[in-house]
Image (cartoon, rainbow, N blue to C red):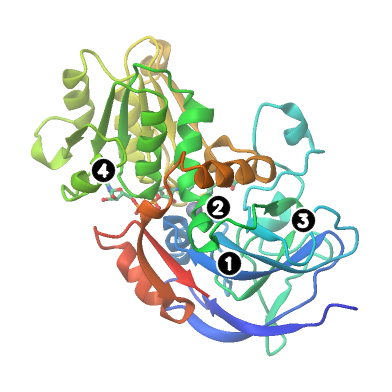
């Protein structure tokens, strides 16, 4: 039977910064190489707020935001072989086609197959959106658009997971938790005994702490301007806390003094370019490596003295923690099922899709890590 157009509820961002509106949206059937997913749970990530703010050069309006979710395949388009209706899945904004130059390189998790389309809010097949309201197209976002009861994604952007995994929890493995763990395991490759500094103790920063703990780091220093973060952070492996507001001197100097010359690895999990500089400059001469995880607004640039790099510090960045999405998200889900990684602990708030604006208000409160919406 041919798949039909579905009408469902979605949270639409009509304009930057204007409250999201719950609308009846038409979701077209999946075309060749596409998958229509019934989204059951979606979390809110800081990156959704970033694009909504209008500061993302790839942000287009009106659009349906959302990229950290889990659901069940509703229908598939022609030629889709790896998933079928009923499969439990996590949509992946970082695709994995296994055929492009990037995928074949073995050097990166970035995939080139659909990136040109996902960056401009459309599908590859006909360069159009599958979402519309009164005939007006609504842009996709990051190739996922999970703030909707149904979404259409490229087949290379779907990870099939263990059907026994609780979707209301493992949705977090679609972005924040996976990114933090992968930044440590894949991008930095932190060794046992290392001293680690983490700037920003939101979900991403705390997942970095958890990754560093499993990697056997000897000291895990958490840095945040909100001192309330430390109590929670301890549960994720942070051993020491530094609030830059408590010091006169630059935070990089504070850290160098605390660590006999600097840290082995640092991670920027905020999206602030001056903190990115501090994160590089608190690294140990000769080998310290800093990983940029945070996403900074359009027009922002990083800087440091080149001497910092000449003398052996290394500046890196990570997208989705370097994980190959379709291959490794199911593996992360299995690790969660075996209780080898935390997920539940990052969920501080639960709401419905209709309460999404309240969820974004929570994001700006210190007590919120992840808010999961039941769609
Ligand atoms: P979040 O808002 O939950 O956490 C940010 C934390 O940084 C908060 O605890 C806040 O108090 C702290 N902070 C803010 N300004 C600070 C400062 N000047 N010094 C120290 N601490 C400061 O965000 P999140 O969801 O954990 O995401 C963190 C960042 O990572 C965002 O920029 C997000 O867009 C980005 N991100 C990137 C990837 C990727 O693949 N690279 C994936 C997910 C998220
Ligand atoms: N459009 C943004 C890019 C933002 C960005 O860097 N996104 C991260 C994921 S953030 C998830 O919360 C990423 O994976 N980037 C790699 C990619 O291909 O987009 C901007 O600022 O231009
Ligand atoms: Zn995210």
Marks 1 and 2 in Cβ contact (< 8 Å): yes
Marks 1 and 3 in Cβ contact (< 8 Å): no
Mark 2 or 4, nearer chain start: 2
Mark 1 Cα within 10 Å, few/some/many (few <14, many 20+)?
A: many
Q: Secondary structure at mark 1?
A: loop
Q: Quadrant of residue 26?
A: bottom right
Which residue is label 4 attached to? Answer: 233
Query: Residue 60: image x %, image y %?
Result: 58, 66
Q: Secondary structure at mark 2?
A: helix
Mark 1 or 4, nearer chain start: 1
Mark 3 Cα within 10 Å, few/some/many (few <14, many 20+)?
A: many
At a point 87% along the width and 63% down the height, the residue shown is: 32
Mark 1 or 2, nearer chain start: 1
Question: As drawn, is 177 to the left or to the right of 27?
Answer: left
Mark 1 or 3, nearer chain start: 1
Numbered disc in front, either 3 or 4: 4
Which residue is label 2 attached to? Answer: 174
Marks 2 and 3 in Cβ contact (< 8 Å): no
Mark 2 Cα within 10 Å, few/some/many (few <14, many 20+)?
A: many
Which residue is label 3 attached to? Answer: 155
Q: Nearer the viewer, residue 167 or 291?
A: 167
**Label 2 to label 3, Cα distance in Å?**
15 Å
Which residue is label 1 attached to? Answer: 146
- Residue 225 seen from this side: no
């Amino acid at each position: 039977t041919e798949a039909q157009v579905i009408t469902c509820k979605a949270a639409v961002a009509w304009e930057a910064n204007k409250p999201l509106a719950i609308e009846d949206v038409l979701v077209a059937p999946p075309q060749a190489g596409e998958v229509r997913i019934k989204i059951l749970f979606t979390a809110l990530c800081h990156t959704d707020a970033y694009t909504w703010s209008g500061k993302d050069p790839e942000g287009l309006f009106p659009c349906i935001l959302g990229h950290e979710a889990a659901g069940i395949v509703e229908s598939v388009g022609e030629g889709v072989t790896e998933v079928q209706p009923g499969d439990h899945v996590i949509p992946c904004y970082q695709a994995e086609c296994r055929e492009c130059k990037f995928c074949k390189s073995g050097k990166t998790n970035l995939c080139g197959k659909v990136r040109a389309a996902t960056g401009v809010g459309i599908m590859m097949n006909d360069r159009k959106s599958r979402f519309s309201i009164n005939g007006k197209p609504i842009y996709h976002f990051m190739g996922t658009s999970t703030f909707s009861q149904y979404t259409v994604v490229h087949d290379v952007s779907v990870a099939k997971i263990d059907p026994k995994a609780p979707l209301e929890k493992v949705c977090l493995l679609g972005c924040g938790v996976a990114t933090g763990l992968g930044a440590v395991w894949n991008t930095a490759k932190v060794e046992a005994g290392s001293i680690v500094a983490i700037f920003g103790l939101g979900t991403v920063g705390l997942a970095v702490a958890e990754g560093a703990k499993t990697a056997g780091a000897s000291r895990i220093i958490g840095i945040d301007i909100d001192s309330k973060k430390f109590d929670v952070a301890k549960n994720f492996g942070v051993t020491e806390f530094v609030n830059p507001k408590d010091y006169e001197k630059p935070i990089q100097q504070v850290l160098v003094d605390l660590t006999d010359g600097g840290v082995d690895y640092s991670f920027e999990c905020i999206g602030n370019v001056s903190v990115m500089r501090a994160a590089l400059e608190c690294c140990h001469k000769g080998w310290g490596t800093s990983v940029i995880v945070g996403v900074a607004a359009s027009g922002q640039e990083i800087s440091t003295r080149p001497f910092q790099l000449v003398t052996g510090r290394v500046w890196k960045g990570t997208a989705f923690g370097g994980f190959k999405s379709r291959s490794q998200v199911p593996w992360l889900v299995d690790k969660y099922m075996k209780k080898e990684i935390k997920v539940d602990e990052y969920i501080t708030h639960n709401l419905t899709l209709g309460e999404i604006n309240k969820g974004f208000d929570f994001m700006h409160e210190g007590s919120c890590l992840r808010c999961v919406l039941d769609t």
